[in-house]
Amino acid sequence: MITRLRDKWWAKLIAALLLFIMGVGCIAGLIGAYYCSSYGVYDTTREGLQERMNREMLSKYSVTAMANYVGAADKELSPNYHYAIFLDSGTGGAKVAGDLETVPENAVIHEFAISDTTSYRLADSMFNNAYVQGGSEDRSWEEQIKKFYYCLAADENNTQVEANAAGATAGTAVESATANAAADVENQTESADAQATDGQTAADAQAADSQTAADTQAADSQTAAGTQATDSQTAAPAQATDSQTATAAAQATDSQTATGTQTEAADTRVTAAETQATAAASEETAPKQPIELYVTGQDTNGSILYRVDPELYRVDEKKGMLWITRNIGGEVGVPGSKIAEFDPASFDTMISPYTVDRFYFDDSYGGQIENAWFRAGSQEEGTVYTVAGVVADKLVLTGNWVTADFFEQVQILLGLLYKIRFAVFAVILICFILGLLLFIFLMMAAGHRGAAGNEMLPDSRIAAAGGKDDARGSSNASGDVSLLLIDRMPMDLALAAVLIFSSMCAALVLEMWDIRASTAKTFCAFGVGIALSYIAVLAFCMSFAVNVKVGGWWERTVICRLWKLSARFLRWLSGMLGITFRKLRESMTGVQMGNRIWALFVLFVFCEFVGLVLFRYEFDLLMIFWLIEKIIFFLALMKILLDFGKVKRAGAEIAGGNLEYKVETEKMLIDMADVGNSLNTIGNGITSAVEERMKLERMKTELITNVSHDIKTPLTSIINYTDLLTKLDLKDSKAQEYLEVLGRQSARLKKLIEDLIEASKASSGALKLDMEKVNASMLLMQALGEYEEKFRRKGLDLRVTGETSEMMVRADSRYLWRIFDNLMSNMLKYAQAGTRAYIDMTCDAGEISIIFRNISDTPLNITGDELMERFVRGDSSRSTEGSGLGLSIADSLVALMGGTMEIVVDGDLFKVIVRMPAAE
Amino acid sequence: MDKILICDDEKDIVTAIRIYLETTGYETVCCYNGQEALDALRTDEDIHLVLLDLMMPVMDGYACMREIRKISNVPVILLTAKSEDTDKIEGLTLGADDYVTKPFNPMELLARVKSSLRRYTLLGGVNGQPEEQDANVLSCGAISIHDDSKEVFVDGEKVALTPTEYNILKFLVEHPGAVYSPKEIYREVWHDAAFEAENTVAVHVRHLREKIEINPSEPRYLKVVWGRGYKLEKA
């Protein structure tokens, strides 16, 4: 059922409302419980509570009144009464057990504890100015509150009459003092005077012993007067509380009547009524006057000033309350107008004999309370007038909170509290449990939008969907959770908004409370504030629940986003820094190295300077800065040295011949990398150059061998067949001649090719020389040995001169033989027959010179250098055997072996000088 | 007569050589690449000499040479235009008995053929008879000196030498492979202090070479170590 309900928006709404109610109930219950416990509802019975309440209430106000009571009577305050004593402030004091706050300075303080079992008698003299002031919570209620019932007459049964009479007497006494100063007994006057003028002493005297006074009165007129005085005094307080007493005082002003009454009175207690009656009887002529008591504080003619505690009754604002005992009736008004009227018959005697009528002077009367008057009934025979200040023992509960005064309001409240004192707990518990269930329901239901009509779903699916649904923003079949737009709001923002809103509402409510707006307005504001806050909080809770169900709420919060943003920002920043560094590095490659290094140096110095300036006062920071700088420097230096080392090694390797060595330049500093790259390039270059050169050499050699091979093969056939032809022994002489030519020429061709190959090999340096120490002179001899025969046949006289000792040269012996062979073969071919040829060998300054000289057969008109050229022959007709390569080959060979060859042609003298370095 | 295998990719050359050889009286077998030569050798067991060219298609001379040496001890004379020393060394190292460069003197070729055949047969070849081992016979390779009769045979052929020449040759044959300076030879032979030794010795050696060598300019036995002296090459 719950799962079905959770889709329905109305279900959720109802739940929310119920939750609110439960919440309110909880809070109300808690408040009730608080009040209950603070009022001590749990400690005592209903009655006890009542008493305590009364005590508390009355403890809050002090009642002072000014009244003038002239009379002496010790009035006993009986127990079980509530007393309110109204006196002239400043002239006397009595303190009801409790705290006294405004006791006049010269007041006589009597602390009297009034309990059920004791009574207190105020001396007559005291009555004038006695006052009762507040109780305290410390005392038992019984002690604090007593009804003070003041009677004008000192009669047990008719204390009221006495009071009145006393009041009247008091008034009369005053007048009699003045009017009848001469008449009667001087003592009376005196006493009257004394009593009249010295209210306090009279009061005191009266207070001391009212009975005695009464007795005295009985015995003596004077005494009677005194008694009366006492009585009147007694009356006076009564009057003070009650305008009826004023009436008594007024009656008392009727001195003659009063006096008459007094003198006639035999009893101590003369009811005011009697007095009045007597007075009335005696004074037939005197009309019945209503007792007018002016509520004022100044007039001693029975007018009383009624003041009450400003706290409670706002006397400062000229409000007050007039207490009127019943059965006196009367009217109350302010000068010029009557305000209210009291109907004595209205008193409900059934409930209590002491209920009072009261009139409350509120602030509409302004300052008129001082001059308010009370006029009470008329002095009719048998009428009992009671003018007293009374505090009700039992408050009359109108039950109407609005019109009830504070006492009653408290009364009502306490009654309520008492009734509910146990109920509150039940309420709290039930409200709490129900509220919790509703809250849980709401949380479970949160987010389920539901489609109408789609209610029946298997439980498993609902359970699965409800708990772990990941659907976002798609409100499909019932059981799926979706997010409304507002739910997408980041949770932390929502929380903050709710909190702010609630505090605003609270602030508003407090504001209203502070300015003491009317209760209605305050309650309105309070209600609205609470409701709005509640809605906001609930909405937040539900939104949060939805978010949790859908998942990913943390990612949507502002905090998380900010975190990610800052993380991304930091990453971007580091990326930027990285890019900046790379760009810086790249841009720096273009700048010259020296400038770069100097720029870095300047930057470094500048940083140092900045650091010094910044930290010059904080040595610790400066130290840290220095340390960091040194570490950076160390690292940089390390890097530089490593790179340099690598480059240096590369250079050494390449110089040493390891051309393949490559140095890795990827991670080096820019300039080191350049050097490294250059070295690599050099290595590559050299390698490729060497390879190129070797290839060329190989090509050359291959060319020579291939070509020579290709030429030699056909030549072989030519020679062979020519030879064969020769062997055929042809008879034709011409054929023989031609064959001879063929043979000769093919031989020459063969020689030519051989020489050509030799020459090209020698000149290209493709020959591999085995240089060693060779005995040149021996070699020459060996060569001579080879050619001696041939020279002899040609008729050349070969002379060898020079030192014959061993001359060592550094040469390849085979090729040296070739050189000699070539030169001597030349001599053989081109020297003139019959001439002498010389070969000279000398050693001179580390150099060995071999000179070949001969006379040329044909004239040489060609220079030596030209002769050494290839294919140049001395015989310009080119008819002899030679190929023209001999000298060229010899020259190349000599050069290869580190020597020099020089040809000097001088007329017909042909000279070849070969110089070779000596080997020793 | 002996059968000779001629192998060269140049037909003309083969024909020419064949004519020479057959005129001299040898039998010939002609091939034009290494593979044919191998096949001929395998089939015909009567071949006493092989004339082998180096640059041939299908199988060149070197490979053929190697193959030949695996199956037979028959003398091989390399015929080639490659005249470099390195080529000669390589060829002889591979097992050739002689090396002739093109273009060649047909007479020289014939002489070498004869010498190689003689050696082959003399040294226990197919048809050879073992030579008499005489205590007084000094021999080094193809040269043998009969001291008793003061006769010198090179490749079986008698050579006429002068007494000086004979002494020099004998001296050198007694120490084959050793290099002797002219002075030493002079002292040994003339028993006299060397005076102008180089010239005299050189001349004599020259004459000696002309007599015993097929090609004095390219001696096979008596070699000149230029600047050092002379030696007799070991066999």
Image (cartoon, helix red, strand yellow):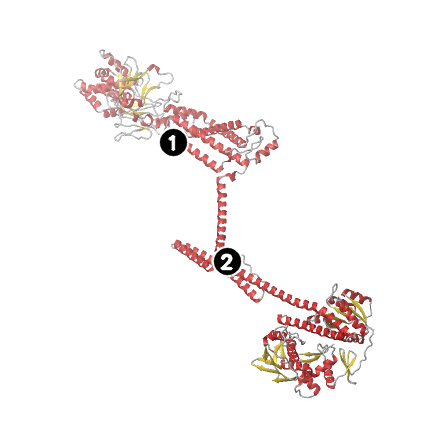
Task: Tell me where residue B64 appears, x and y as whole percent.
Answer: 75, 66
Label 1: element kind: helix
Examine the rendered structure and indicate whether residue A569 appears above or below residue B158: above
Disc 2 residue type (three-letter): Ile
Query: Can residue A443 be seen in the rendering of this structure?
Result: yes
Tell me if A850 is positioned left or right of A98 in this view. right
Q: Which tag, 2 or 1, sits closer to the chain's start?
A: 1
Q: Which residue is mark 2?
A: A670
Task: Tell me where residue A664 appears, x and y as whole percent.
Answer: 55, 59
Name which quarter of the figure residue A626 lies in.
bottom left
Label 2: element kind: helix
Task: Tell me where residue A265 appears, x and y as whole percent.
Answer: 25, 16
Gap in angstroms between the C-alphas marked 2 and 1: 74 Å
Q: Which residue is mark 1?
A: A511
Query: Can residue B95 be seen in the rendering of this structure?
Result: no
Count of number-bearing discs: 2
Q: Callout 1 environment at 10 Å: few (<14), some (14 to 19), or many (20+)?
A: some
